[in-house]
Image (cartoon, rainbow, N blue to C red):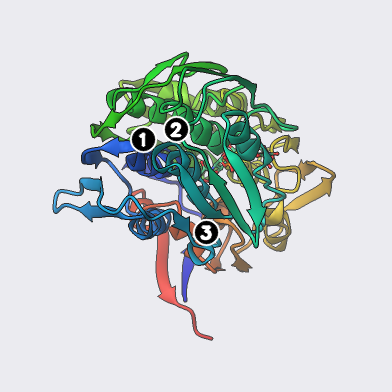
Amino acid sequence: MDELVVTGGVRLKGRVRASGAKNAALPIMAAAILAEGPVRLKNVPNLADIRTMTRLLRELGLRVEREPDGDMVLENVDPDKVLAPYKIMKTMRAGICALGPLVARRGRAEVSMPGGCLIGDRPVDLHLKGLRSLGAKLEVKHGYIVTSCKRLKGTEMYLGGPFGSTVTGTANILMAAVLAKGQTVIECAACEPEVQDLGRMLVKMGASIHGIGSPRLVIEGVSRLSGAEHTIIPDRIEAGTYLVAAAATGGDVVVEDARWNDLFALIHMLRQAGAVIEHFDDTIHLVAPKRLRAVDVTTLPFPGFPTDLQAQMMAMLTVADGISVVTEKIYPDRFTHVAELNRMGAAIRKEGNTAIVQGARRLSGAPVMASDLRASAALVIAALVAEGKTTISRIYHLDRGYENLEKKLRKLGATITRVKAKD
Ligand code: EPZ
């Protein structure tokens, strides 16, 4: 197993480019199940989760090829396959995005319930509720969602849950409704840029969708969808991670392929902390202040502050002047990074879904353990700030969502290497 070894204390400087968005590419790959013809995707990142989705779709009877130029081509070759096995689903929850397209296009599906997750309780009840209201017969049996329907029927539904909208839930129901009979209205739909990108892809395939980017989606079902070509949007969470790392290390960094409107909540917070941030086209330039100021952060569905940047922001706030309060309103238990940051000398106290961060700490390098994708990114940021050497183990979590992380950070001047773990 690999580990990352980081020697901290370097101000990050230079330019870095964000890769394609993992959380847009995953549902868009699943949307290929709906297409009568090949789908060509550009800017698909090279990540462990993308390889897992590729395995799942091949299991579901699709040909999935990466071309020498990096394009990904997906095509249905065996439409009788409807089983999404536990062995794949347990490694990646986003596999649930195959459910809607399978029942809409193939009339039935057997999809393993996703397993547990360290960031908290992540039920899929809204996905199931949405499919049932489109007329799907559905039961959960032996750990599998077993569903069938000759043709889904459009309807009006409210898809909000206890924490607001659901991202992959909206994606699943949207991909089901595009082939349903009649009109579907999804109220409290997720507006995340990744859901918008999926909507634009489906329209290219021939779907009729109004309200993309708003909480009310109106879908006129069609009888068939064709293949299409699509370029995946840049990854705002990856771009945001580099901006936070730049601010935390007192750096001066330009992130290319970073869309201002996708990152405005973060930019607002970083400006409050004292950073100077400008943009032109899809390029964002951040210059860190001499001393960062404490800010209070509350995570919310888009366009609110993204939960997937909460841990990285907390790592930055450990060195800001003053006390910051971080409130997690999407995954109330998403604080697995707190104990590891405290091991590095941070002073963070957790109370329910809130963490109180005592700032202006001098972090010191230490052996730490990654627990989930974004918590690992927070540990990398803390290690870049800390005095001395930090060793981060279990970095397979990072490889799920960050393409060439250490190479990109080295390009910004960081001292970071990937090594084989000793034991
Ligand atoms: C997506 O997960 C992202 N994953 C997550 O990113 C991200 O953290 C999350 O959205 C929130 O922004 C992908 O896009 C592949 P949700 P998703 O359904 O769709 C509750 C990363 O780091 N809920 O929007 O699974 C749920 O428990 C990952 O890249 C229900 O109660 O998240 C949560 O509290 C981690 N019932 C809230 O809603 C449901 O049926 C939002 O979850 C569905 C969700």
Judge: label 2 CB < 8 Å from ligand 1: no
Calculate the distance from the C-alpha at mark 1 to the C-alpha at mark 2: 22 Å
Farthest residue to the bottom: give it. Answer: 423
Ligand 1's quadrant is: top right
Q: Nearer the viewer, residue 48 or 10?
A: 48
- Give the mark toward the camera: 1 or 3: 3
Q: 327 above or below 115?
A: above
Residue 270 in the image: x percent, y percent?
A: 56, 29
Residue 358 horizontal side relative to residue 85, left or right: right
Residue 130 in the image: x percent, y percent?
A: 61, 32
Calculate the distance from the C-alpha at mark 2 to the C-alpha at mark 3: 19 Å
Query: Which residue carries the number 3 mark?
Result: 89
| Label 3: which secondary element | helix
- Mark 3: few, some, or many residues within 10 Å (few <14, many ≥20)? many
The amino acid beneath tag 3 is Met
Residue 388 in the image: x percent, y percent?
A: 55, 65
Dot label at residue 175 = 2
Q: 247 above or below 374?
A: above
Choose the circle earlier in sequence order: 2 or 3.
Answer: 3
Calculate the distance from the C-alpha at mark 1 to the C-alpha at mark 3: 25 Å
Residue 306 horizontal side relative to residue 204, left or right: right
Choose the circle earlier in sequence order: 1 or 3.
Answer: 3
Is residue 338 among what the camera can see? yes
| Label 1: which secondary element | loop
Dot label at residue 234 = 1
